Each structure stands twice: as structure tokens, then as C-alpha cells.
Amino acid sequence: MDRKVKWSPEALEDVESIAQYIARDSQFYARSTVSKILDFSDSIAKFPQVGRIVQEFNDKTIRERLVYSYRLVYKIERFRILVIAVIHDKRLFNSISKRFE
């Protein structure tokens, strides 16, 4: 059963910030990166378990996929998949931990 993928407002803001940051140097790479992030989010609808468990939480329902140097973090729920964050892999995870409460 494919679940619907829903984006949290914060995750959408993350993607917008990433696009703006990359676009300062290249509009092309900004669009390419955002497109790749969106493609990955579509793929988790069919195969949500493909992402690895987020080490910081050790909860099998909170997973991530790496997209270039960004972590697409999502929560598997019964009827949907909620994208919670898209953060750079060097960024400290505790800066977004409030999103999981």
C-alpha cells in the first residue's frame, strides 16, 4: 500500500532555504537539488522502509534518505509519510529535535 507523502511546513522551509543558498552560486544546481529532493520524497511513498533509521532517535518509524549532502528525514505513520526536515548532513540534529515532539 502506497502512503501519501505530506510535507511539514518546516521541511518546506528547509527546502526553500537550501534552494536560496545554492542559487546564490547557481540557479541550475539549485533547481537540480530541489528536484532530486522531491524525487526522493516520491520514492518513499512506495518503499518507506528503504531509508535508514535515524541514529539520533533509534525509532524504526523515523527514517532518512541522503540526497547529496542533505538528510531527508521522515516519519512513517499508518496512512501517510510525514517529511519532517531536510538538513545538511553536517548540521547538528538537535537544532531540529523540537519538530519530533
Image (cartoon, grey):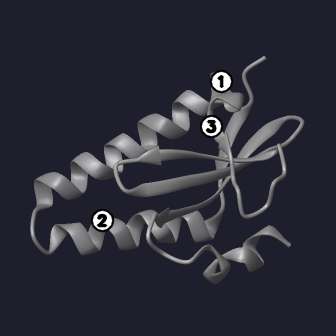
Q: Mark 2 or 1 closer to N-term?
A: 2
Foreground disc of the pair 1, 3: 3
Q: Regarding mark 2 in the picture, which secondary structure is present there?
A: helix
- Residue 59 is left or right of residue 17, and the answer is right
Q: Residue at x 60, y 71 (%)?
A: 10
Q: Is residue 43 above or below residue 55?
A: above
| Distance in Å between CA atoms under marks 2 and 1 | 26 Å
Tell me the kind of residue under disc 1.
Answer: Phe
Question: Which label belongs to residue 19?
Answer: 2
Question: Which label belongs to residue 51?
Answer: 3
Foreground disc of the pair 2, 3: 3
| Distance in Å between CA atoms under marks 1 and 3 | 8 Å
Q: Is residue 46 above or below residue 12?
A: above
| Distance in Å between CA atoms under marks 2 and 3 | 23 Å
- Residue 74 is left or right of residue 16, and the answer is right
Q: Position of residue 17 (x, y in %)?
A: 38, 73
Q: Position of residue 95 (x, y in %)?
A: 62, 82
Tell me the kind of residue under disc 3.
Answer: Gly
- Viewport quadrant of the N terminus: top right
16 or 49, nearer to the observer: 49
Question: Which label belongs to residue 47?
Answer: 1
Q: Residues within 10 Å of mark 3 (few under 14, many from 20)?
A: some
Q: Regarding mark 1 in the picture, which secondary structure is present there?
A: loop
Tell me the kind of residue under disc 2.
Answer: Ala
Q: Residue at x 53, y 33 (%)?
A: 42
31 or 49, nearer to the observer: 49
